[in-house]
Amino acid sequence: MKRFANIHTHLPEDKAVVNLEPEQLPDDSGWFSIGIHPWRACEADTLWPMVEKAALHPHVVAIGECGLDAVRGPALDIQTPVFERHVQLSEALGKPLIIHAVRTWPQLISVRKLLKPQQEWIIHGFRGKAALAAELLRHGFSLSFGKIYNQQAFDITPPERRYRETDSMPDSL
């Protein structure tokens, strides 16, 4: 993933990984990630076949944005199995996982310990403090930093586990 200057955006951009919604199709014009956002976990039965098919495209370089969100979206007992399916897909295809996480750090760490993934797990848009960054790094996560971030957390993240992103969104959203 280091070949990309921006590992998470929603807009076409040079040297970036563009996050696609399941209904969008990857093509050869850029590099992509695809997954079911935790806010849409209730739609997983409908969306999952689209994700699986698109994930096979050679220009899809990561799985996600997927994850767990305790503030918005369906209950965590609905989000968690959907997230675990993403982990299985990431492992099967040998592609890193881009993770959306809001107030679910213990749950994410627990899933990681349980599933013992070999692929890189990248927390996108990390804004937490250095202590949380250290905890996540200790458990094998990598961190991606956007426009707003904690400088101390950025500084303690080893360069090989540190990413940059814009998370830019279309004006229509």
Image: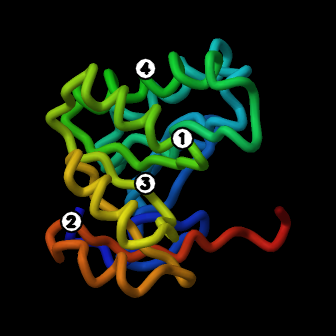
Please state the horizontal and vertical placement of residue 49, each as a whole percent of the image.
Answer: 53, 18
Q: Are marks 4 and 3 in contact (CB under 8 Å)?
A: no
Residue where numbered disc 1 is placed: 104
Please state the horizontal and vertical placement of residue 123, each as a whole percent of the image.
Answer: 41, 55
Q: Nearer the viewer, mark 4 or mark 3?
A: 4
Q: Amino acid at mark 2?
A: Arg
Residue where numbered disc 2 is placed: 161
Q: Are marks 1 and 3 in contact (CB under 8 Å)?
A: no
Q: Residues within 10 Å of mark 2 (few under 14, many from 20)?
A: some
Q: Are marks 2 and 4 in contact (CB under 8 Å)?
A: no
Please tell me which residue is depicted at 63% across the width and 25% down the height of the picture: 76
Residue where numbered disc 3 is placed: 32
Q: Secondary structure at mark 1?
A: loop
Residue where numbered disc 4 is placed: 85
Measured in 3D between alpha carbons, the distance from the residue under mark 3 to the one under mark 2, in whole angstroms, is 20 Å
Q: Locate the N terminus and report the quarter of the image it occupies.
A: bottom left
Q: Amino acid at mark 1?
A: Thr
Q: Residues within 10 Å of mark 3 (few under 14, many from 20)?
A: many
Q: Amino acid at mark 3?
A: Phe
Of residues 135 and 74, the one drawn nearer to the viewer in this rendering: 135
Q: Nearer the viewer, mark 2 or mark 4?
A: 2
Please tell me which residue is depicted at 56% across the width and 82% down the height of the picture: 148
Q: Are marks 1 and 4 in contact (CB under 8 Å)?
A: no
Q: Nearer the viewer, mark 1 or mark 3?
A: 1
* Horizontal side, residue 37 vs residue 86: left or right: right
Quadrant in the rendering for residue 109: top left
